[in-house]
Image (tube, rainbow, N blue to C red):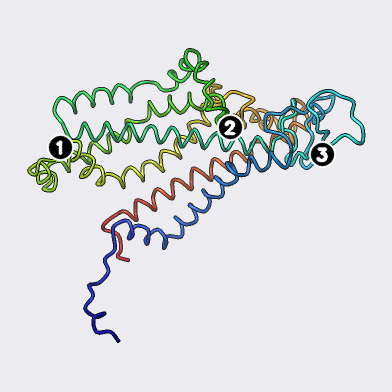
Amino acid sequence: MDASADLRPPRTHGSWELVWRRLRRDRVALGSAVALLLVFLVCFAGTPIAEHFLGHGPNDIFPMAVDIDLNAVPAWTRVPNTQGVVTVTPKTPRTLFILGAGDPVGHDLFLRVLAGGRTSLEIALGAAALAVFIGVIVGLVAGYYGGWVDAGVARVTEFVMAFPILLFVIAWGFVLSNRLQRITLHGRLAHGVISLILVIGLFSWFYPARIVRAQVLTLRGSEFVEAARMVGSSDLRIIRKHLLPHVLDTIIVYGTLMIAGTMFLEAGLSYLNVGIELPDATWGNLIAYHYGTVLHLGSAASPPGQTYNAVWATLFPTIGILTVVFAFSLLGDAVRNALDPRGRRV
């Protein structure tokens, strides 16, 4: 045995390595991460794959998928693969509707559930990222400089907190949304995604701002900050190199929780008809569109075909929203416990 091996210093673990080791031992965190990974794969990778094999998109209309009474075809039905009213023969190519038609127009419900999940996740991730980005910058500046800067930021934060966001969203939809809805990044996003990301993000940044500001107020008088000032470090370098790393754990935890809250907010806006407009689908507007049919389940007002498919149209988006919300919430709690320096040793 090499004697020099006994003289080697013990290997030290970095803080993030310890966090990762704690997370790997947390079954709830692993289960939440796996659930989120599956949802993202199904929505983002599964949508184009399903479109390729089925031969149509979520917004394509199939008049032959509904009968003369506007009853949608049920699940696992093959309908003529044509989007126009043409003469249908036994040799006409047919396409499979896995979950049936989603409405009396003849949209593919399966593809709309996948595409709707992708759009809802894009809104939640984009709005949460924008809100956290603005909030972190505002909180760092207000907490570090204090004085009149902190007082001014506090007044702006209070104004934004007191502003009725629902009224602003409705006004935004009538005044500015038409221009912003045309921004789709060359068709990569649905119409209205940019509009919702901006309005939700611009009126949600005060939560992370207040949290980051409170932490920075307790850190700006620390010895490492004073030492950085003594060696001539600029304010920007102190904020970026010394203060930001100390609030990074809070940013990560709050970001995951904010994504969950944004999912609920997007679904709620769909009930007010100020979210993504049809025919573009989200999980929220799918539930809102079919909720009345499910509510009158079995009544004469809801035809059997529409009632049958409306159950699928509300069940899968509801499961998707609950899965994402609970998974992000549990993952955020697990990350917070892993980042806690008072946690158990690993």
Q: Residue at x 37, y 30 (%)?
A: 204
Residue 289, quarter of picture: top right
For mark 1, does the 10 Å Cα neighbourhood hold few (<14), some (14 to 19), or many (20 or more) residues? few
Q: Amino acid at mark 1?
A: Ser
Q: CA distance from mark 3 to mark 2?
A: 25 Å
What residue lies at 57% left-to-right and 47% top-to-bottom? 41
Label 2 or label 1, whichever lies nearer to me, is 1
The CA span between labels 3 and 1 is 67 Å
In percent of width and height, residue 225 lies at 13, 44
Q: Which of the marked residues, 3 or 1, is nearer the chain's N terminus?
A: 3
Q: Regarding mark 1 in the picture, which secondary structure is present there?
A: loop
Q: Secondary structure at mark 2?
A: loop
| Residue 4 numbered mark, or none | none
| Marks 3 and 2 in Cβ contact (< 8 Å) | no
Up-down: is 162 above or below 249?
above
User: Of label 3 and label 2, which has the lower sequence position?
Assistant: 3
For the residues carrying marks 3 and 1, which lies nearer the camera in this image? 1
- Image height check: is 154 above or below 242? above
Q: Which residue is mark 2?
A: 282
Asked if residue 137 is positioned above or below residue 30 in the image, the reply reads above
- Front one among 203 and 78: 78
